[in-house]
Every structure is written in structure tokens, then in C-alpha cells.
Amino acid sequence: MKKIAIVTVIAAALTGGAYAQQTTGVGGPIEAQVLMAIPQSATTFTEFYKQNVYAPSNLKIGEIKDVLVDKDGKIRAFIIGVGDFIGRQRTDSGLAMPFVDQRNVAVPFDAIHATKKDGQRWLTMNVDMDSLSSAPAYKFDKAKATWVPA
């Protein structure tokens, strides 16, 4: 009788384990968590993350340091590493702006526009340089895993 009880408990545990593997932990089937095709309107983080951002005049504004996503998975803002600007300087590739004391500023997602230039993807932003210089600065707080005022 003891052996039958042990076998019954093991069988129930194995059956329950097999059932648990078929669900997501919140009652939904695993299949609901997998896409069968990539949405056509989707883009990748690599299209933005660590990419340079330019003014419409080809002036480099800075580099995207982070992509901020809300709890619903929507991109809401970018953190851009910019500098305190000391003047403009012409280079072979166009205008460049030397930076002193790079700092990070937040910009809304819809402020950055992807365009094509010479077959390359360019990220542009129509911004007044004074606005970037006077924008609040942020630093990444590793303990909180978030951006906080600098």
C-alpha cells in the first residue's frame, strides 16, 4: 500500500510538472508568448542605441546612450550624450562641434527622426544648441538602475 501511495504522489508530481511547462505561470499557454512573424512596423534598438544624432545641418549633436521604455514596452525617450559646446569646427565630413564636459540629456522619442543620407541611416534632431546646453543633465544610478538628475 505504501508503494502505491508513493507511485501515486510521483505520478501526480510529474503530471503537474508537465502541465506547468505548458503554461506561462499566469495561466496562459506558451504559444501566446511567441510570435510567428516579426511585425512589419517593428524596428530594432540597434537602429538607435549608440548611434550618433545630427542636426539638419549635419552638425553632430551627440550619441544615444540609452533608450527609455515604459512599462507597456513603448519607447518614450532617449538619453543623448552631448557636451557643453565651445564652438563649431569644419571637418571633411561636414560640421563637427567639439565637446567639453559631456553630459546626458533626455529627449522625447518623437524628437529623433531616422533619415537616409548617402545610403546610410542618419538620426537627426531639429534642436537649438542652446536648448541642449541648458537642458537638465542626468546620470545613471547603478544601484537604482535608472537615470537620475545629475
Image (spheres, grey):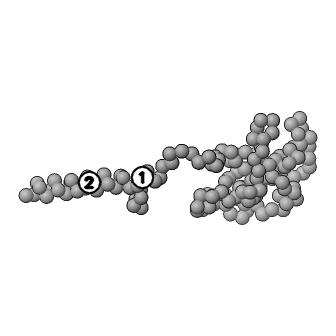
| Amino acid on which the number 1 mark rests in the picture | Ile
| Amino acid on which the number 2 mark rests in the picture | Thr
Instruction: Confirm whether residue 118 shows in the render.
Output: yes
Of marks 2 and 1, the one in the foreground: 1
Please tell me whether residue 19 is drawn above or below residue 58 in the rendered image.
Answer: below
The x and y percentages for residue 93 are 86, 37
Instruction: Confirm whether residue 84 shows in the render.
Output: no
Q: Earlier in the sequence, mark 2 or mark 1?
A: 2
Instruction: Tell me the tag on residue 140.
Output: none
Q: Under tag 1, what secondary structure?
A: helix
Crowding near the residue tagged with mark 2, few <14, some 14–19, many ≥20 C-alpha atoms within 10 Å: few
Q: Which residue is mark 2?
A: 15
The x and y percentages for residue 59 are 86, 46
Foreground pick, 29 / 20: 29
**Which quadrant: the N terminus?**
bottom left
Foreground pick, 38 / 80: 38
Q: Which residue is mark 1?
A: 30
Q: Residue at x 87, y 52 (%)?
A: 85
**Which quadrant: the C terminus?**
bottom right
